[in-house]
């Protein structure tokens, strides 16, 4: 068993209560590491450490120096990508080919925001009075709470932390209690890179720890990635304290194949959209809308491909799909599959846990496809966060738009067509934060990302991701020399 400590004010600690919990490997269902459970005092200590670092060093450190630290951190992440990927795959069952790529991606995002750390600037604004100079400054908030989910701890952290640091903030991070190890391991690189103590702090534990981060005094901004239900609680807590919050929540994203699409590519896009990451990704293309003219062909080919996906040890490079990340998630996915069956969706592939004896210890779910799903069924409305695809037929573009926009969520959408005019109409019609045309699940450090409707608000990555962690100050300088006494007697 590995034993981890929290990272607060540059030191490793078990926390004031010295309480711990085990983290399970979902492939073996055995405990593999022990993680501290933070107390409220520990959270308070981490916030105070971040505040101290902000006031004493970080807010005054030139962007160029902050960038150098971030670039150094990116180099270490690249060097350690493989061992870090092994830790994450062991903790959440995501296949190593995906976690390895995510570590390289994380380093890339650090490099991108390192490049922006000395470029956060305001503007000058001409006023009616030419003898008053008006300009704006972009300033950091101060102490920012970063709360992440279990599906991709380091990649999710990379969507927040580099931007927060580049904008000049200090942070307190809380990873999910289901997958904390890689974030704690990451703190070793923070230490090696030479960040001043208190700039980056990590507390671990359950929902109480997350809630404390949203309720305690001293946090100036929250950035949250998780479920819509918890997101609502985080937004409520932020409203009580009148602090801003960025919410990256769930999705039920439509992937739409028109009859004129390049079908082989579209089918690969549909398959990868839902079965990559075992469907445990916010941007999963969990609703596949297919035009009637190609519906039967698409369903047949998808089912063939899905049945060939290789399940196995997430650490084996040959494995194509890993496990559900934890027992509660496994049970939620199975319940959603059973509900879809009960509601009359047509099961075409999978339909439950894996039955192969070599997989019996792991939390495996077979790649599952339901066809002839009605858009109102819960399998087509609720986020499952697992390898479960609902295939929904449509006749016309208008019908596709209505179905695509007909959920409470609005994270992403995919459109497969070779008709450029249709693609442009669909881009405009989608109520989502991201639209992919003839691709799916593509992300980049430079491209802003974030949802609409029940999928949250605010942006991560890209230039907008940096602005999310900074606050605008307006400045007026009067150099007219005029006396502006409002009480002076009028002559
Ligand atoms: P979750 O909402 O259960 O937990 C997320 C984090 O919030 C965890 O660290 C948890 O401990 C913490 N938390 C729990 N209660 C809290 C509270 N009251 N106050 C503050 N923090 C609290 O989500 P999860 O099950 O870990 O992750 C799955 C969800 O995350 C899915 O809905 C998925 O779509 C979403 N997600 C979204 C994105 C995105 O970028 N939009 C990315 C990945 C995952």
Image: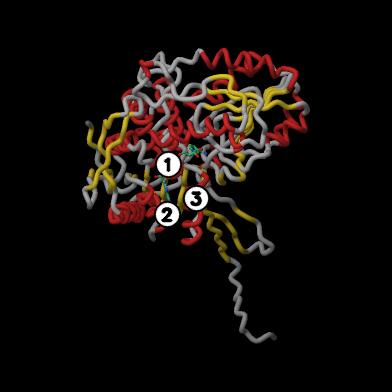
Query: Which quadrant of the picture is home to ligand 1?
Result: top left
Q: Is residue 436 visible?
A: no
Q: Which residue is mark 2?
A: 214
Residue at the outermost front position: 342
Mark 3 falls on what kind of element?
strand
Q: Which mark is residue 417?
A: none
Looking at the rendered image, the disc whose residue lies closer to the viewer, 3 or 1, is 1
- The mark that comes first in sequence, 1 or 2, is 1
As helix, strand or loop, the secondary structure at mark 2 comes to helix
* Direction from residue 268 to residue 296 in the image, left or right: right
Q: Nearer the viewer, mark 2 or mark 3?
A: 2
Residue 224: where, in percent of width, then height? 47, 46
**Is residue 474 or residue 357 the one in the foreground?**
357
Q: Are marks 1 and 2 in contact (CB under 8 Å)?
A: no
Q: Residue under circle 1?
A: 148
Q: Residue at x 66, y 60 (%)?
A: 127
- Considering depth in this image, is 202 or 105 the residue closer to the camera? 202
Cβ of mark 3 under 8 Å from ligand 1: the answer is no
Q: Which part of the image, by quadrant, shows the C terminus?
A: bottom right
Label 3 and label 1: CA atoms lie apart by 20 Å
Q: Picture coordinates of residue 100 (x, y %)?
A: 40, 23
Q: Position of residue 55 (x, y in %)?
A: 35, 56
Q: Which label is found at residue 470?
A: 3
């Amino acid at each position: 068993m590995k034993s981890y400590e929290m990272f607060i004010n540059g030191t490793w600690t078990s926390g004031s209560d010295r309480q711990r919990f085990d983290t399970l490997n979902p492939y073996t269902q055995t405990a593999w590491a022990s993680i501290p459970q933070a107390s409220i005092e520990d959270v308070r200590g981490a916030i105070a450490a971040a505040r101290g670092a902000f006031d004493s060093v970080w807010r005054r450190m030139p962007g160029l120096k902050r960038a150098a630290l971030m670039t150094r951190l990116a180099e270490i992440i690249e060097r350690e990508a493989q061992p870090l990927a092994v830790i994450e795959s062991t903790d959440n069952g995501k296949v190593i080919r995906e976690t390895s790529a995510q570590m390289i991606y994380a380093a890339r995002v650090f490099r991108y925001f390192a490049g922006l750390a000395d470029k956060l600037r305001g503007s000058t604004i001409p006023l009616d009075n030419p003898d008053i100079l008006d300009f704006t400054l972009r300033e950091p908030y101060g102490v920012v709470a970063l709360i992440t989910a279990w599906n991709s701890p380091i990649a999710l952290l990379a969507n927040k932390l580099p931007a927060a640091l580049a904008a000049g903030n200090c942070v307190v991070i809380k990873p999910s209690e289901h997958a904390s190890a890689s974030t704690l391991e990451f703190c070793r690189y923070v230490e090696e890179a030479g960040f001043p103590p208190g700039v980056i702090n990590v507390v671990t534990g359950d929902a109480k720890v997350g809630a404390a981060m949203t309720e305690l005094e001293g946090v100036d901004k929250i950035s949250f990635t998780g479920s819509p239900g918890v997101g609502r609680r985080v937004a409520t807590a932020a409203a009580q304290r009148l602090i801003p919050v960025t919410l990256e929540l769930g999705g039920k994203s439509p992937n739409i194949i028109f009859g004129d699409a390049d079908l082989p590519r579209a089918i690969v896009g549909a398959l990868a959209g839902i079965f990559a990451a075992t469907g445990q990704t916010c941007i999963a293309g969990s609703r596949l809308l297919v035009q009637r003219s190609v519906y039967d062909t698409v369903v047949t080919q998808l089912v063939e491909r899905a049945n060939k996906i290789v399940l196995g040890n997430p650490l084996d490079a040959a494995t194509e799909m890993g496990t559900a990340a934890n027992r509660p998630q496994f049970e939620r996915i199975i319940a959603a599959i059973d509900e879809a069956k009960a509601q009359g969706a047509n099961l075409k592939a999978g339909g439950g846990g894996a039955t192969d004896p070599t997989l019996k210890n792991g939390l495996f779910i077979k790649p599952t496809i339901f066809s002839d799903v009605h858009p109102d069924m819960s399998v087509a409305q609720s986020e499952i966060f697992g390898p479960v695809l609902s295939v929904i037929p449509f006749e016309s573009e208008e019908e596709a738009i209505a179905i695509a926009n007909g959920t409470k969520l609005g994270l992403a959408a995919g459109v497969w067509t070779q008709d450029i005019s249709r693609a442009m109409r669909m881009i405009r019609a989608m109520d989502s934060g991201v639209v992919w045309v003839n691709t799916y699940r593509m992300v980049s450090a430079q491209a802003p990302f974030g949802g609409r409707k029940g999928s949250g608000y605010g942006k991560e990555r890209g230039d907008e991701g940096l602005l999310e962690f900074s606050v605008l100050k307006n400045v007026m300088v009067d150099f007219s020399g005029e006396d502006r006494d409002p009480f002076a007697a009028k002559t």
